[in-house]
Image: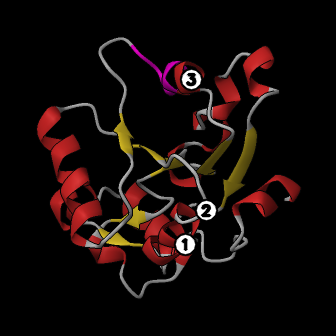
Amino acid sequence: MVFTEGTIIMHNNAFNKKRKDIIDQVKKRDTSVHDFKTYIPIGNASKKLKLWSTQSIDLIYLTSRKKQNQIDQIRDVLIKYNFPKGKLLFRKQNEEYKDVVEKETPDVLIEDNCESMGGKKEMAITHVRLLIKNKIKSIPIREFEGIDHLPEKVEDLFYI
């Protein structure tokens, strides 16, 4: 399971900006932050996920969006930038991220550290029940840093 916004895609005004400046844009509510249809990949996220998708995995995306039109915009961005096929999950009414993660119980959860939104307390894995959390390899990455630095072999994710 890979979180979308902040982990593999970002608002378009973040292009070519330093990470610190991107976080400031989010905190200051730059207009492009809520223009989901114009989101762009972070680094070579699409290429990395394509590589992983050839290694017998079921790819699951998790978006922060809850409204159907915004979910569709995120899906369109993933398609536009050739991200590999995978389920796109979202929180339904009265659900939290932990509920979605607990329902799916992925082997691996890659999500950003939510620095612009309040940090670890905002991460999905933080609130997952311990019994389930122990079954998930959590890989937190720095927000807007992308996944390019992660291993090419999916099995190597378990050794991070």
Residue interval drawn in magenta: 95-100
Under tag 1, what secondary structure? helix
Q: Amino acid at mark 1?
A: Leu
Q: Is residue 30 visible?
A: no
Disc 1 from disc 3: Cα separation: 27 Å
Which residue lies at the image location 82% right of the left edge and 52% below the top edge? 158
**Residue located beneath label 1 in the image:** 51
In the foreground, 111 or 144 = 111
Q: Amino acid at mark 3?
A: Lys
- The reply to whether discs 1 and 3 touch (Cβ–Cβ < 8 Å) is no
| Quadrant (top left, top right, bottom left, bottom right) of the N terminus | top right
Disc 2 from disc 1: Cα separation: 7 Å
**Residue located beneath label 3 in the image:** 98
Residue farthest bottom in this picture: 16
Height in image: 109 above or below 124? below
**In the image, residue 98 lies in the stretch drawn in magenta:** yes
Residue 112 pos. (x, y %): 59, 53
